[in-house]
Amino acid sequence: MTEPLEHRPQTKLPDPVVRRLPRYLIGAQELRAAGATWVSSVELGRALGLTSSTVRQDLSHLDVEGVAKRGYEIAKLASALTRTLRADREHRVVLVGAGFLGRAIALHGDLMRYGFEVAAVMDVNPEVIGTSVGRLTVQPMSALSNAVKRENIDIGVIAVPAEEAQAVADALVATGVSALLNLALVQLRVPETVQVVEERIVVSLQELAYRLCATGSRGQVQVG
Amino acid sequence: MTEPLEHRPQTKLPDPVVRRLPRYLIGAQELRAAGATWVSSVELGRALGLTSSTVRQDLSHLDVEGVAKRGYEIAKLASALTRTLRADREHRVVLVGAGFLGRAIALHGDLMRYGFEVAAVMDVNPEVIGTSVGRLTVQPMSALSNAVKRENIDIGVIAVPAEEAQAVADALVATGVSALLNLALVQLRVPETVQVVEERIVVSLQELAYRLCATGSRGQVQVG
DNA sequence: TAGATTGTTAATCGATTAACAATC
DNA sequence: TAGATTGTTAATCGATTAACAATC
């Protein structure tokens, strides 16, 4: 009759919570940078546009405890968030598509800061293959499979035009990558075992346009 | 005792619906490109990972009617979606930040296709000011206010580093722009009357990483 | 101590799904 | 016609919020 293993909140967080956690983390790091040490659920709520109830409910899923009358210690909160989001382990990324969008991602400093390393860049365009992106060289798609294995890649980012995205997704899945970030404007078809997150500027703009026109609406909305 | 004005479904769509509408639109246009004429709620649901019930519920908010035994006429569906999303009226965009990300957006052909025209590009970096992005020339921030007025701009896109994003947002708000797409990794503080949609690669990657690690989870997720 | 803030339970709210009559 | 599919109502499910005892 031993006690069950210490902490085990990690069963499976609800989707809305998972989407808010990164925002708490960003908020916590902003606060830390600003020199704060403690933050209350009311303050966090105000900063992110949530009720303090939601904040406490969300943070209760984490391996962190608040202190009555003081709130949460920011450093501990950030590390708990990092742990829960698996931002402590490094993720290795292959980027397919070395256009402006791809380059923006590959050269984006914040990625490293949050544990994502772009370890390979591929493209189909012969003119682009061989050019350099930061310290990497753009490789042809034929080198994909080797790169994924050699570099221990677990995430694929698709930054190619819509027409090519499905083929790229298929190639990535074939090499065993099971997490895709799709920036192209198509609905990908992938096996159930593959995780896909879509992020699309046009869609965000459409949502914004709707909100802008829908008279009287206001407020802040989180998309990704 | 006249009838109330024809159709008036536009009271205020629930947020989850607004976020799905662009996906239906993309789906509809893919189908149309593939030569299809009709689509049923079951097919749409399968394509987007939704139940047919959700699809019918969502589409019932639109100014379109399905036909029993056939489904929805794709062309009509697309135009109803376009109308509801206000993708028929043109939106004029000012882009702040002419780095790779900014250029990716400014040169992104799909934007035009969906009614968004990048009408001005600004940057703070003197080295970048004066260079051209497509047919536009990068202007200094001091030209922002004039550009917004002259070009009739209603949407601002923030594609600058996190440190500068708040100042850019303030400047945009000051010129009267009341819809912002924020691509920087900060939580913006804006007046209640201003619409903000956030889109952040790092956040999407974090969500993906969580899903990848959370054993046993699978499926497709829409972020933006 | 008194008062603020947590963690958590219960109540509310809203979104998704099921079900089915109407209809082509 | 028979069968498939809509539009919509009602039931279910889940997320957010309110409330409050515990506590620092």
Image (cartoon, coloured by chain):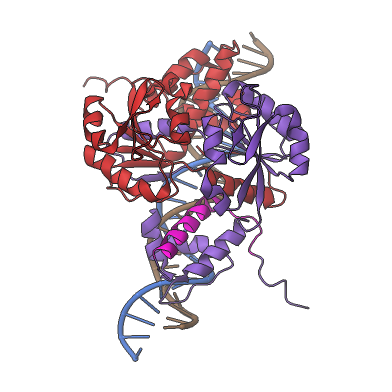
Chain colours: A purple, B red, C blue, D brown
Vertical relation: B82 (above or below) A81? above
Q: What's the residue at 55%, 44% (across, down)?
A: B204
Q: Would residue B27 be found to the left or right of residue A41 on screen?
A: right
Residue A77 at x, y = what percent?
A: 52, 66
Residue A112 at x, y = what percent?
A: 57, 50
| Quarter where residue B12 is shown | top left
Residue A165 visible in this rendered orientation of the protein: yes
Q: Is residue A139 magenta?
A: no
| Quarter where residue A52 is shown | bottom left
Q: What's the residue at 31%, 19% (across, down)?
A: B6
B13 or B158, which is in the foreground? Answer: B158
Residue A10 at x, y = what percent?
A: 65, 60
Q: Is residue A22 magenta?
A: yes
Vertical relation: B148 (above or below) B30? below
Magenta-tinted stretch: A9-34
A171 or B78, which is in the foreground? Answer: A171
